[in-house]
Image (spheres, rainbow, N blue to C red):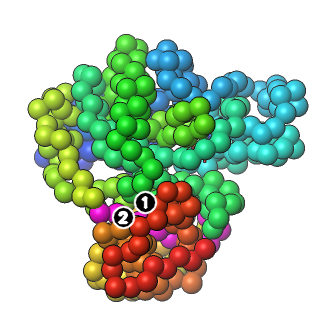
Amino acid sequence: MMDNMAIVDICHQHGITFVIIGNDAPLANGVVDALMAEGIDVFGPTQAAARIESSKVFMKDMCAQANVPTGQYQFFTNSGDAVTHVRRHGAPLVIKADGLTMGKGVTPCATVNEAIEAIRQTMDLRTYGPGGTSVIIEEFLEGEELSFFAILDGTGCIVPLTAAQDHKRAYDGDIGPNTGGMGAYSPVPWFTAAHQQEVLAHIVIPIDAALRANNAPFCGFLYVGLMKTPSGFRVIEFNARFGDPEAQCILPRLTSDLLPLLWLAAKGQLAKASAPNFSPESCITVTMATKGYPGQVENGSHVGGISAAASLPGSLVFHAATCLTPEGIYTAHGGRVLNITGLGPTLDDAHYTAYQAVAKIDWPEGFYRHDIGHRAHNLEYSSPPTGSHAPRHSR
Ligand code: AMP
Ligand code: GLY
């Protein structure tokens, strides 16, 4: 996946003329540039534009240029200097690896000692990989998190999609280490049309313009990671791709065709596209991961019950890290293995279906959170379920 010329060769061999790139690492590795150089159409940002995700320092520079609201920060290439800053500044704060870390290189720290340990893990021990060579230390922001998505074509045309709320912490009750995401739901009841306009006007449109002004026009899904603080929305991250597991709870709600949007964006002609349509139905996606994730995990355990889970009305099972062998389906290549989505008229219905489907999975080596969607209920969402079943809220 990281050999750009091998991907180009596969396209030539199979007559592939249009490619959609979904993953952060190949984007940061310039696969889009390699394909475009061969005349192959691509939906996804170039290496230069993908720095909005692959370098937190570049992201912060773009935010400063575009006047996009984000947390205050300092940048460090030396762990001693980072520790000195933490001792002087005090807690809480957030230690973030500058480069890519598969969603694991961000450590919110309540105390100075936690922050010093996070610097040691990130910079000295490189626990999260080479992305931890440098760090930013960011102010701790409090509020509700939200992932908002838009499609950009690099010419200034922007098509807003919708929002989802991810659950980044590993365990129930939003505790434990940060992960790539343990489940998500969409729509997010408190995120109004006015909020969407605000995010577009003050964040998406200016960042798109800043990227174009810096010779890094962005074509692709722009993922805007937001915190709704008491003083307004702040960007906590941009990603140069769709979210995982946000995509699995947003795309089932899309009732119009996705492909024309991506194709026209790749051509720089997004202005010709019709606006996407989303069903008012709700989706909840529950991520199932191997026990031990986000730490190192063993691959190779058997996962049963997938057909039974997928055949429940309103459920969808997305494979993330599985392989099919003559003996059945086994885990492979990573921690997050399945995403199970429930779709229904309300979040309660979606929740019921998703967890009914999860209960069909026979995988003793796996774990999942039982409370996906709980923040929607703790906030403003209170309508009763429409189905004949009672809602289930495992907390
Ligand atoms: P990121 O990879 O930057 O999205 O960070 C992962 C998670 O860390 C986010 O989803 C937040 O839950 C948390 N986080 C990141 N930045 C901050 C911040 N400045 N203040 C509080 N929490 C943060
Ligand atoms: N769910 C967070 C991400 O895709 O980065």
Residue 86 location, quadrant: top right
Q: Quadrant of the C terminus?
A: bottom right
Magenta span main SS: strand
Disc ID at residue 109: none
Q: Is residue 26 left or right of residue 96?
A: left
Residue depicted at x 68% and y 56%: 177
Is 231 rendered above or below residue 325? Answer: above
Q: Is residue 131 left or right of residue 273?
A: right
Q: Residues within 10 Å of mark 1 (few under 14, many from 20)?
A: many
Residue 330 location, quadrant: bottom left
Disc ID at residue 185: 1
Mark 1 / mark 2, whichever is N-terminal: 1
Amino acid type, residue under disc 2 in the picture: Cys
Residue depicted at x 46% and y 65%: 382
Q: Is residue 63 visible?
A: yes
Q: Position of residue 159 (x, y in %)?
A: 26, 36
Q: Is residue 174 left or right of residue 390?
A: right
Amino acid type, residue under disc 1 in the picture: Tyr
Q: Residues within 10 Å of mark 2 (few under 14, many from 20)?
A: many
Q: Position of residue 121 (x, y in %)?
A: 76, 45
Q: Are marks 1 and 2 in contact (CB under 8 Å)?
A: yes
Disc ID at residue 283: 2
- Highlighted magenta segment, given as a residue range: 281-294
Asked which secondary structure carries label 2, the reply is strand
Asked which secondary structure carries label 1, the reply is strand
Is 82 rendered above or below residue 178? Answer: above
Q: Is residue 321 magenta?
A: no
How many labels, in total? 2
Q: Position of residue 300 (x, y in %)?
A: 52, 75
Residue depicted at x 51% and y 40%: 226
